[in-house]
Image (tube, grey):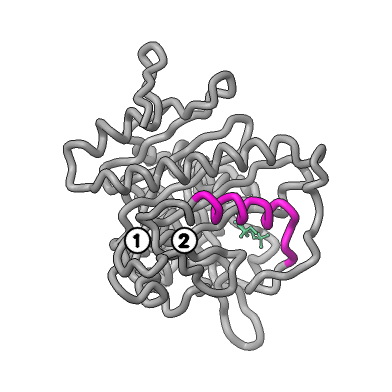
Amino acid sequence: MSTIIRGDKLTLSHYLLSHLRDSNIQAELNLVISDIADAGKKIAHEVQRSGLLDLHGAAGGKNIHAEEVQKLDDRSNEIVKSILSENEQIVGLASEEEKDVVDVSGGRTTGFIVAFDPLDGSSNIDINATVGTIFSVLPSWADIRADFLQPGRSQLASGYVLYGSSTVFVFTVGKGVHEFTLDPDNGEFILTQENIKIPETAKYISYNEGNKTKFRGSEAKAIDKLVKNGGSSRYIGALVADFHRTLLKGGIFLYPAVSSDGGYIGKLRMQYEVKPLAHVMHEAGGVALINNENAMEVAPDELHERVPFVFGDKKIVNKYQKYRYDT
Ligand code: P6P
């Protein structure tokens, strides 16, 4: 493991060695995080050239959620799988693009399992808007499939890679939230923000306004009250981008359940979108809720479960919750 330091800048590998050294986090987890960052570098390389590499448009299939798979979804999924399956500490993978868990244990019974959304926000790919990769690392002891159903608080590491105007890698191992920016000149992730805490600005309100008439009445009413209290609307349509802005600038993001066939259903995927981002938000001093419960305490019922999701700074989320139940 190279421990390169660029001037006064810390590389990811050096930071992991020093950051994890004085904690009970095994060095093996260090390697898993490094592998995920390496996958992010490879995906960033392809995202930046997607129009040149004929990686725009649909791949021709549908995922488990019956959504059209984009070519870059498939490519990103293969990149993450190929790198992580080479790591002997990893025994199982779960992906938005894989119907079932992928057993990479080679007969080993204990190790790490990693859930990931290889390319979140794919509808943004062809318009050159921000997309990202989201990951969640859990311990596994015996039954890989069952072990993916642990609650958010069981995660050992969570985070994302954001492919935007620059490529950033944000992660937590339960010891704060840290951001690394990819230096295109040398291919290293360099520490750019340490111990990020979400500012309590209550500034941005972020949700798909096209769905508002399908929310429960109390949610629509609470949103109206937040808007009346000021605050700008921002919605990028890629969860990782809306999350990263909320993390750095404050505000609230809402994807409530929407009415469908007589019931209410969530859209965002618990395993590889909601759980990991709730972990990062929790570590940054924010709030993340699934059906009014602390998202860190909720366990998935099944591998590809979809849930309603609200997160943001404490100030505005508490206001939203109060407005929902004001009579
Ligand atoms: P809508 C992208 O497909 C995604 O899963 C998230 O990245 C994003 O937050 C959400 O869906 C956008 O959904 O219904 O507003 O297009």
Q: Are marks 2 and 1 in contact (CB under 8 Å)?
A: yes
Give how far across and how far down residue 202 sits, in percent: 44, 44
Residue found at the very far top of the displayed protein: 7
Give how far across and how far down residue 289 sits, in percent: 40, 63
Cβ at disc 2 under 8 Å from ligand 1: no
Quarter of the rendered image showing ligand 1: bottom right
> Does residue 169 appear to the left or right of 3 in the view shown?
right
Q: Secondary structure beneath disc 1?
A: strand
Residue found at the very far bottom of the displayed protein: 262
Is 82 part of what is drawn in magenta?
yes
Identify residue type, mark 2.
Answer: Ala
Is 227 part of what is drawn in magenta?
no
Give how far across and how far down residue 221 sits, in percent: 53, 66
Q: In the rendering, which numbered label is found on residue 164?
A: none
- In the rendered image, the vertical position of residue 238 relative to residue 254, given as above or below: above
Q: Main secondary structure of the magenta part?
A: helix
Residue at x-position 46% and y-position 69%:
103
Q: Which residue position is annotated with label 2?
A: 115
Residue at x-position 58% and y-position 54%:
118
Tell me if I can see residue 228 in this picture. Answer: no
CA gap, disc 2 and disc 1: 8 Å
Residue at x-position 61% and y-position 45%:
234
Residue at x-position 44% and y-position 54%:
277
Mark 1 Cα-neighbour bin, 10 Å: few <14, some 14–19, many ≥20: many
Residues drawn in magenta: 68-83
Identify residue type, mark 1.
Answer: Leu
Q: Secondary structure beneath disc 2?
A: strand
Q: Which residue position is annotated with label 1?
A: 138
> Does residue 18 appear to the left or right of 256 in the view shown?
left
